[in-house]
Image: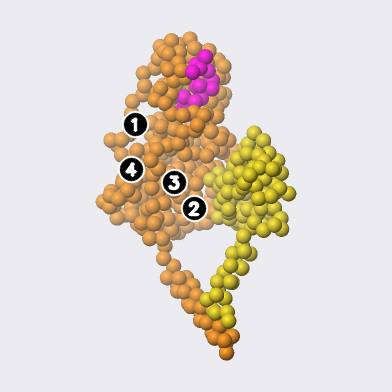
Chain colours: A yellow, B orange
């Protein structure tokens, strides 16, 4: 007795689930598109790795300037992945050396801390 | 029977969506003018970092230092020697002139609205104004004055001892290189461009700019593609692009971040007061706004590092005039131009 409206709603839910990058299958994924990070903020636990995927049509340069992490990806071409592992708790800003308005805020909780979904 | 009904229902939705998409593609409106204007609304006040909060004493000291030629090795060149308030904080030369009257490699950039900057210099090699402030002072081809020597010189001036102590009351030794940097950076953050006709128009004064400028604003946001890099109230996205100017030894952003793809790339500058800041580009090689438009109409070098955001534009003569009429609405009104240089301490 499934009615069309319910059927469409079910499809919508499935579509949302498929687009949600936070499944348990792997590290959190962030897309770079249109000179912006999507999403533009993340909560993770210390020791976790984040995958940054360049979905853009232009080269990016992933940068982190933080006392615990000074990172320069070099050239990240369209289609390429960069992996960033955050060993220490803290607040980090990931930016791009070519498009400095790009900003991804990463809140890294202590491994056993509150707010972290899981430690790997 | 039910499955047929569901099938028809789904098909009708698909058809409706398809018609909608096709209709949209055919009609393809630009954003309406109010939406466009909203993207250019000015912020209320400049941001100051927590490590260097604004105080009037610091800003006053910074201004004094900025205008003092004693900050150069030969005591003959102040920051204001290249960043002239009456010229939109530039100098009107193709490239700056530094120590010993010799030309510096790049055009003096304006200081309008640097409080909102992410990186500083044409190649973005400084990440804060505090870091930036000392670099032209120490550069041998600019002001040629090592900071240690400068601090000793300033400590010998009673007026500076007093001004530093007022600006940094907590400091044991107020006259220091760090505090000099902080004071100059604080002054620079106060260099917010006054309200222009364009800003008044965005704020709701429908008569603040003319018809030609309004048409130019639409071109700026559309056919002329300027917003690709010069969008937002400060008319820059702060990003680095190779726009196909003649290649030289100066590789710009590439060597700074060690990414060869952005060799020949320089930072997109603000366009505020742009029509008062000729000549143009990091190398000062384009004498007029007409030459700049001709450059973007296809007079640029095609090479592997050319920005993927750059495409040759096509404008009619009238459209070029409209675009320039619009850019002129970004001029600081004559009545609001900064004037007075401070009195220098003895
Ligand atoms: Cu980028």
Badge 3: chain ID: B
Assess whether mark 2 and mark 3 are in contact (beta carbons under 8 angstroms).
no
Mark sitting earlier along the chain (4/1): 4
Image quadrant for the C terminus of chain B?
Answer: top left
Residue drawn where x is 59% and y is 85% of the image: B3
Please state the extent of the stretch shown in magenta in the rendering: B170-186
- Local crowd at mark 1 within 10 Å, few (<14), some, or many (≥20)? some
Mark sitting earlier along the chain (4/3): 4
Q: Which residue is mark 1?
A: B338
Mark sitting earlier along the chain (3/1): 3
Q: Which residue is mark 3?
A: B235
Mark sitting earlier along the chain (3/2): 2
Q: Nearer the viewer, residue A24 or B100?
A: A24
Q: Which residue is mark 2?
A: B228
Badge 2: chain ID: B
For label 4, the SS is loop
Q: Are marks 4 and 1 on the same chain?
A: yes
């Amino acid at each position: 007795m499934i009615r069309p409206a319910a059927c469409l709603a079910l499809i919508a839910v499935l579509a949302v689930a498929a687009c949600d990058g936070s499944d348990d299958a792997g590290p959190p994924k962030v897309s770079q598109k249109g000179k912006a990070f999507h999403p533009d903020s993340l909560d993770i636990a210390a020791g976790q790795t984040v995958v940054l995927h360049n979905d853009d049509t232009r080269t990016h340069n992933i940068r982190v300037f933080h006392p615990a992490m000074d990172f320069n990806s070099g050239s990240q071409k369209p289609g390429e992945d960069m992996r960033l592992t955050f060993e220490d708790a803290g607040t980090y800003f990931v930016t791009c050396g070519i498009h400095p308005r790009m900003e991804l805020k990463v809140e890294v909780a202590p491994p056993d801390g509150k707010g972290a979904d899981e430690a790997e | 029977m039910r499955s047929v009904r569901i099938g028809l229902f789904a098909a009708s939705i698909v058809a409706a969506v398809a018609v909608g998409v096709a209709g949209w593609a055919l009609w393809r409106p630009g954003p309406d003018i109010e939406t466009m204007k909203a993207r250019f609304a000015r912020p209320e006040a400049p941001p100051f970092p927590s490590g260097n909060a604004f105080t009037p004493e610091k800003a006053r000291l910074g201004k004094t230092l900025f205008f003092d030629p004693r900050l150069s090795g030969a005591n003959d060149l102040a920051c204001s020697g290249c960043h002239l308030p009456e010229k939109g904080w530039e100098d009107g030369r193709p490239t700056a002139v530094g120590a010993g009257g010799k030309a510096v490699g790049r055009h003096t950039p304006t200081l309008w609205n640097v409080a909102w900057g992410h990186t500083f210099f044409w190649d973005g090699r400084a990440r804060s104004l505090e870091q930036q402030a000392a670099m032209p002072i120490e550069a041998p081809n600019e002001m040629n004055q090592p900071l240690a020597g400068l601090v000793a010189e300033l400590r010998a001036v009673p007026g500076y001892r007093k001004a530093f102590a007022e600006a940094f009351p907590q400091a044991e030794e107020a006259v220091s290189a760090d505090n000099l940097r902080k004071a100059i950076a604080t002054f620079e953050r106060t260099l917010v461009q006054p309200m222009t006709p364009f800003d008044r128009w965005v704020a709701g004064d429908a008569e603040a700019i003319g018809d030609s400028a309004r048409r130019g604003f639409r071109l700026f946001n559309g056919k002329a593609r300027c917003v690709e890099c010069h969008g937002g109230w400060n008319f820059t996205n702060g990003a680095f692009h190779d726009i196909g100017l003649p290649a030289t030894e100066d590789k710009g952003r590439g060597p700074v971040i060690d990414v060869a793809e952005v060799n020949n790339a320089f930072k997109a500058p603000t366009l505020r007061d742009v029509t008062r800041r000729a000549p143009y580009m990091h190398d000062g090689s384009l004498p007029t706004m007409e030459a700049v438009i001709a450059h973007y109409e296809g007079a640029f070098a095609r090479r592997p590092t050319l920005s993927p955001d750059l495409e040759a534009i096509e404008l009619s003569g009238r459209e070029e005039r409209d675009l320039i009429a619009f850019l002129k609405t970004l001029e600081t009104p004559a009545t609001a131009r900064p004037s007075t240089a401070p009195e220098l301490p003895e």
